[in-house]
Amino acid sequence: MLILAIESSCDDTAAAVIEPENRILSSVISSQDEIHVRFGGIVPELASRRHIEMIRPVVHQALAQAGVKLEDIDLIAATQGPGLVGSLLVGFTFAKALALVNNLPCVGVDHMAAHLLSCLLEAQQPSFPYTALIVSGGNTSLFAVEDPLTFTRLGRTRDDAAGEAFDKVAKLLDLGYPGGPEISRLATSGNPHTFAFPRARLSKESLDFSFSGLKTSVAACVHKLKKTDRTLPIPDICASFQEAVVDVLVDKTLAACARTGYRSVVIGGGVAANPRLRQALSNRCTEEGLQLFMPSPALCTDNAAMIGIAGYYQFLSGRFVDADSDAYSRSPLN
Ligand code: ATP
Ligand code: FE
């Protein structure tokens, strides 16, 4: 079975061809970073216009790279939500139209569910059930994943998402957008103990997160340092900030595992590409005898292959979309 998958929830136009036996035949991503970088964040109107320009060439390229034709495709999967509605509508409508014209079944995929299942595209796969941390630009949540269609949320951020905190701190330090990759790169040459930034652990029982206090604390620190004539110790700020985020993410994930009792742990979402988070979580899971499954960094950040695998399970359960199905901005999972 061949699946053509399309993702356009935010600022990247992506298409992939996969075989559900977990082989990625192609995965094409057209990034819009260069359009949004000068605004320090995504401009929704510009994002949807760019999706309109890129959707056809990206889908074409995904088919060509996979060495297949549209006639070979058995199922079309597209992100239905959550995200920027103007962006979602481009990919979702394109998918529905393509399915209609070619008489193909079409499924709408929840972007969060796709992040939760992206590890199923790797050679080493978890078995169900598992505990999952989704940590991205718009979400920071913990889930109990019973099967590919059943997710119970255990906790979420009460304010900023971890990726959002990375992006905001990067903006504060003039490091461009998106900030996560640049902060993690600079952090490798910094000392994580230079600044004692706060770790919001909330109550012991809570599996919720809060990152807005941390962001404010970094801003106050930068403001104070700027008043002195010293050049900003940017790598030290990045390393100390990153460590504060990682500490909380790791602690709460381990607490979630204790709550579910499941022995497999999965991560997903853009921040899951962060090398320090991967290392710290890996160490703690080894100590606790838990099995950790991490998608490769390219499958953590937004991609269409994960939409394909999540779409496959929608297909198996017979959940199809029709011409009237609409995109949605908020995930029912969250
Ligand atoms: P969501 O999935 O919540 O809708 P999104 O789709 O916009 O968010 P993803 O691609 O899943 O985003 O994640 C992007 C986020 O991941 C950005 O905030 C980015 O800064 C962050 N990120 C990417 N790489 C890294 C990294 N190496 N370290 C930390 N953060 C990172
Ligand atoms: Fe995402």
Image (cartoon, rainbow, N blue to C red):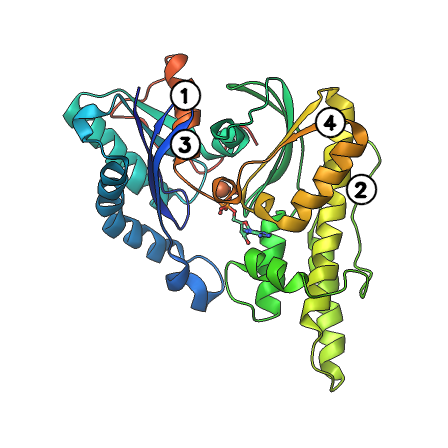
Amino acid type, residue under disc 2 in the picture: Leu
Label 3 residue SS? helix
**Pointer 4: what residue?**
290
- The amino acid sitting under disc 4 is Leu
| Residue underneath mark 3 | 307
Q: Which residue is mark 2?
A: 202
In the image, is residue 29 above or below residue 264?
Answer: below
Q: Is residue 84 left or right of residue 143?
A: left
Mark earlier in primary sequence (1, 4): 1
Tell me the distance, in whole angstroms, between the alpha carbons under discs 4 and 2: 24 Å
* Front disc: 4 or 3: 4
Packing grade of label 3 (10 A; few <14, some 14-19, many >=20) is many
Instruction: Give the mark nearest the N terminus, 3 or 1.
Output: 1
Give the quarter of the image for residue 145.
top right
On screen, residue 262 above or below 244? above
- Of labels 2 and 3, the one closer to you: 3
Mark 2 nearby-residue class (10 Å; few <14, some 14–19, many ≥20):
few
Name the secondary structure under disc 4: loop
- Residue at x 27%, y 40% (from the top left corner): 65
